[in-house]
Amino acid sequence: MKLPEPIHVPALPPGNATYHQATRLGDLLFVSGQLGIDPATGELAPGGQVAEYRQALANIKTILEAAGSSLAQVAKTTVYMTNVDDLAELNVVYAEYFPHAPAKTGVEVRRLSGRAQIEIEVIASAV
């Protein structure tokens, strides 16, 4: 049985010791939920939910590229947000990053880690 291979990108802040930024299993990459943390400051991107959304997507792009993949190879996203009222604006940003419109699930949640307003995870092709 093949075991998942951890993917670690030193340029991005790690979550904690209980998980990796991403794992590769066969031809798939599973990117752990990413908050909108600016790697230069270690803080959430200023400017609210939409700014955090952009930063989380930029972080995902960095992880995918480090693993030899890309945003164009994303097949599925899951977006957790604390306020669904910004959904129309978030969808505009989403379309900028994912013009191929991968499958998506969006969930409004009461709270996220560290007072984040957005968390995004993706599944992508590794080949």
Image (cartoon, rainbow, N blue to C red):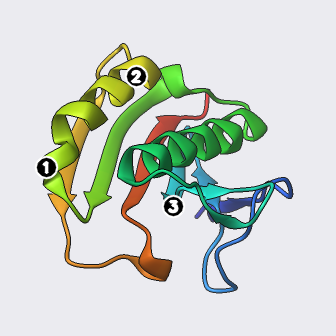
Q: Disc number at residue 85?
A: 1
Q: Tell me if 100 is positioned left or right of 91 in this view.
A: right
- Residue type, label 1: Asp
Q: State which quadrant residue 42 falls in.
A: bottom right
Decide: few, some or many residues near mark 3? Use Cα within 10 Å; few <14, some 14-19, many ≥20. many
Q: Disc number at residue 113?
A: none
State the residue position of label 2.
98
| Quadrant of the image containing the C terminus | top right
Q: In the structure shown, which secondary structural element does the residue marked by tag 3 occupy?
A: strand
State the residue position of label 3.
35
Percent x, y for residue 56?
A: 53, 49
| Quadrant of the image containing the N terminus | bottom right
Q: Mark 2–mark 3 contact, CB under 8 Å?
A: no
User: Count the marks: how many?
Assistant: 3
| Mark found first going from the N terminus, 1 or 3 | 3
Q: State which quadrant residue 43 falls in.
A: bottom right
- Residue type, label 3: Leu
| Mark found first going from the N terminus, 2 or 3 | 3
Q: Nearer the viewer, mark 2 or mark 3?
A: 3
Please name whichever residue, 36 or 97, is drawn nearer the observer in this view of the structure. 36
Q: What residue is drawn where x is 81% and y is 54%?
A: 40
Percent x, y for residue 41?
A: 77, 61
Against 19, residue 26 (above or below) is above
Decide: few, some or many residues near mark 1? Use Cα within 10 Å; few <14, some 14-19, many ≥20. few
Q: CA distance from mark 2 to mark 3?
A: 18 Å
Q: CA distance from mark 1 to mark 2?
A: 21 Å
Q: In the structure shown, which secondary structural element does the residue marked by tag 2 occupy?
A: loop
Q: State which quadrant residue 23 falls in.
A: bottom right
Q: Mark 1–mark 2 contact, CB under 8 Å?
A: no
Percent x, y for residue 44?
A: 58, 63
